[in-house]
Image: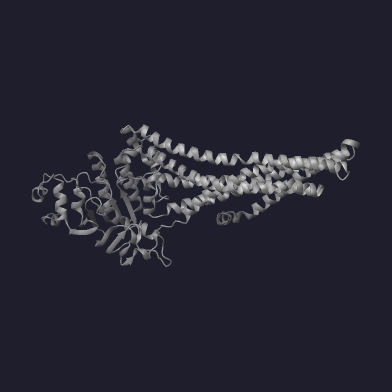
Amino acid sequence: MNIVRRLWQYAWPYRGRFSVALLAMTVFGAASAGLAYLIKPIFDDVLPNRDQLGFVAGAMLGCYLFKGLASYASTCLMTGVGQRVIRDVRDELFSHIVGQSAGFFTLRPTGRLMSRILNDVQQIQLAVSVTVGDLLRESLALVGYGAVLLYIDSGLALVCLTGAPVVIYPLIRVGQRVRQTSRRSQEELEHLSHITSEAFTGHRIVQAFGAEAHEVRRFGAVSERLFRINMSVTRAVAALPPLMEFLGGLAVAGALWYGSREIAAFRLTAGEFASFLAALFMMYGPVKKLSRVSAGLQQAAAAAERIFEMLDKHTEVLDRPDARALAPLRHSIELQEVGFRYDGSDGPTVLRDVSLVVPAGQMVAIVGLSGSGKTTLVNLLPRFYDVTEGRIMLDGVDIRDGTLRSLRGQIAMVTQETMLFDDTIAANIAYGCPDAAQDEIEAAARTAHAHEFITALPGGYETRLGERGQRLAGGERQRLAIARALLTNAPILILDEATSALDSESESLVQHALTNLLTNRTSVVIAHRLSTVRRANTIVVLDGGRVAEMGQHDELLRKTGGVYAKLYQRQFFGRSASEARPTNNTPDELDLEPLGSRQRD
């Protein structure tokens, strides 16, 4: 009942359409009952004496006309209500999921989330758009047929309907089984979506390691389980119609026995008995359909449970009730004894007692071994997560006291894993500024050294990139990401290992683009290349989630035995820090991260 109530809340705005559909269904039921009752005058008046032929023929045509129009109207209206309800559920579910915290997506694979939006909602769509309409329409038809039976002969009607309660128990039992099995089916379908998403997204790795057969076996195993579960549902549902046919046969046999006696005693005419049998036979169609409707409703209930479970899961970072818009950064970003644990106080400690100041217009580089908390730290600035200890201040104001829109509107990001969308190049560059003019988009592309390769493409700025921009090289994707950040003109910039996966030629172009991007901005950079580190006003060295050292490049390098010096030393395959200290012949673009340690935190 809780599920029905929640679904009804989505249908309530469309109650006017629903009411008209219900009225049309009532007309459908009355017209259906009228057709059954008109059998009586055919046998009693029309066939023996040709009396009332025109009236009966006209009445039958009228019943068929009203029944057809009512069926059409109710189907269109109910389907319209159902489609609107599903649209609203799907929109709310997508909006809810896309607004969750970064930790939410870490724990839930993309394929599984897509299954909730597509497969689970599809199950509800069938129920709300079709099944509920069939339930109401056929139920009202049954009421009409039942009224005809009771009107003609209430005693005979009671004899025929004594088997109806026997049907209720198996319907309830089958419904419970269908609901449980449908939930398992949806879970396996979710697993199937996850496997498919992984295999398609990682197709290069699959093929490079010759693992196609392995992926096919994985897919086949889940597909087989899904098949077996669905077959168990089919067997349960298929058992109901034969049972109902048998009970219907008993009712007809009882009607023949009782009716023959009544006709012989002149208490029932042949026309009344024929009309009675017609109504009884007409009841079979709705009853049979209702048995399948019950199964459809149970499947929809299982899917709705999973959808509402997702809607009831809240990990999103929210504005405080009294949050206000943050003014543009003027002085500094300050982290005061910041600590962070995933999943709140029960999770593992990732950061502890991190304190630092980023003056406006300066660049701070964050360095450290993989797993030291670098990416987690920069993810706290735009509030992808909220700190669990301490606070982050923007010009003296706790960022949690400001609105998310005003905070994130001041921040641009360029990450190691460039995310581009299956849209045009122009739309990707203008992703954060959808109202940007074409000349502004081109100006940002020129500054990011992307204009040349864009204009060389057949479609220029209107070229579609495909999924994740895979039609472009890595350096080209990064330059588009830099152009996107440039166009937003945000005062705060976060760079997360933006050049780690590039070849030297691409990196050179990206480095020049990054130089343009860093100009006159407050920057927090997860350092990857030595040139970036050496330009930083302050280098923060993280070790085990704490600030181990802080200072400028030369200052930190002089600390013999320091964490930064050791990191630097490892880049030169074990030489001492003094031997490894850069000279005029030392390339600027050496990795700061230890070899083999470039994965994200």
Residue at position x 63%, y 55% from top? 15
Name the residue nearer the viewer: 427 or 341: 341
* Tally of marks: 0
Q: In the shown orientation, is residue 220 left or right of residue 237?
A: left
Viewer-closest of 405 and 343: 343
Height in image: 118 above or below 319?
Answer: above
Measured from the top left, where is residue 90 in percent x and y? 51, 49
Residue furthest left in the image: 579
Is residue 594 placed above or below 392 in the rendered structure?
above
- Colour style of the rendered protein structure: one colour
Quarter location, residue 380: bottom left
Rendering quarter of residue 289: top right
Q: Position of residue 489 (x, y in %)?
A: 34, 54
| Of residues 550 and 2, the one drawn nearer to the viewer in this rendering | 2
Taking the image as drawn, is residue 30 in sight? no
Q: Is residue 156 left or right of residue 163?
A: right
Q: Nearer the viewer, residue 206 or 97?
A: 206
Residue 117 position, x and y percent, is 48, 47
Quadrant of the drawing holding the N terminus: bottom right
Q: Position of residue 321 (x, y in %)?
A: 43, 66
Residue furthest right in the image: 49
Residue 376 seen in render? yes
Above or below 537: residue 131 = above
